[in-house]
Image (cartoon, grey):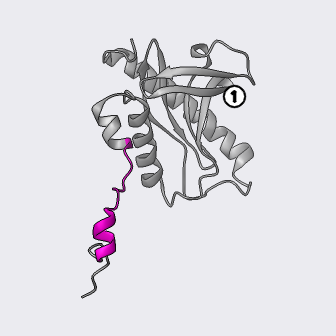
Amino acid sequence: MMGSAPNPARDRDAAAWGELLAASYREIGDRAMKDLPIYNQALGVEAVGFRSFNGTMVGIMVTPWFMNVVMPASAARETAGSNSRIRFPAGDIEFTLSEVGQMGRVASCSLFSPMFEFADMAAARATAEAALAELMLPADSEEAVRRRAPATSQIDRRNFLRGALTERRG
C-alpha cells in the first residue's frame, strides 16, 4: 500500500510532532544559526503539512536556513549520519538521518538550502505545500504525468520556416 487512508487522530499526532520539531529548530536558530550568512531574516520556522503516512509521520520543515522533508528516524531504521531510501507515491526518496535537539533522530531530505530565493514565509509555505503534494502524487497517475510533462510543445518545422511562429508586435 503506497499511502494511507485519512486518519484524523494520527494526523493530529503528526501535526503535534511537527510542532515539537519546529520548536527544536527555533531554539537551534536562536542559539546557533541567526548570525550565520545562510540565515534568511525574512523567514521563520514552520512545520508544514505534517500528516500520517504508512504508519509514521511526514511533513516539511521550513526554517530560515533550509527546507526539508522530515519524518521520525524510526521510519528509516538506520543510524545517525547514514542515508536511507523511503518509498513515497512519487517514488523513492533518499533521507539522511541526524540528531535534532530534544527530538532525537530524524530523517530528512533537503529541498532548499540556503533559503534566499524566498522573499517571505508565504512564498516558502506555498513551495513546501506544493512539494509535499507532489511527493504524495503517485508517479504513474494521470495527474502526475500531466504535471510533469514538458511545458513546451514541439515546433512544427513548416510553420517555423514560413514564419508562422514569429513574434508579433503591436
| Residue 6 horizontal/vertical position (percent) | 30, 18
Residue 68 visible from this viewpoint: yes
Quarter of the picture containing the N terminus is: top left
Answer left or right for 93 relative to 52: right
* Res 9 → quadrant: top left
Residue 104 visible from this viewpoint: no
Identify the residue at image location x=32%, y=15%: 7
Q: Please give the residue where the numbered disc 1 appears in the rendered image.
A: 101
Identify the residue at image location x=36%, y=15%: 4
Does the magenta portion include 132? no
Identify the residue at image location x=48%, y=58%: 120
Segment tinted magenta in the rendering: 148-162
* Res 165 → quadrant: bottom left
| Residue 100 horizontal/vertical position (percent) | 68, 28
- What kind of residue is marked 1? Gly
Does the magenta portion include 157? yes
Residue nearer the viewer, 7 or 160 = 160
* Element marked by disc 1: helix
Residue nearer the viewer, 3 or 140 = 140
Q: Residues within 10 Å of mark 1 (few under 14, many from 20)?
A: few
* Res 139 → quadrant: top left
Identify the residue at image location x=40%, y=36%: 134
| Residue 77 horizontal/vertical position (percent) | 64, 12
1 shown above or below 36:
above
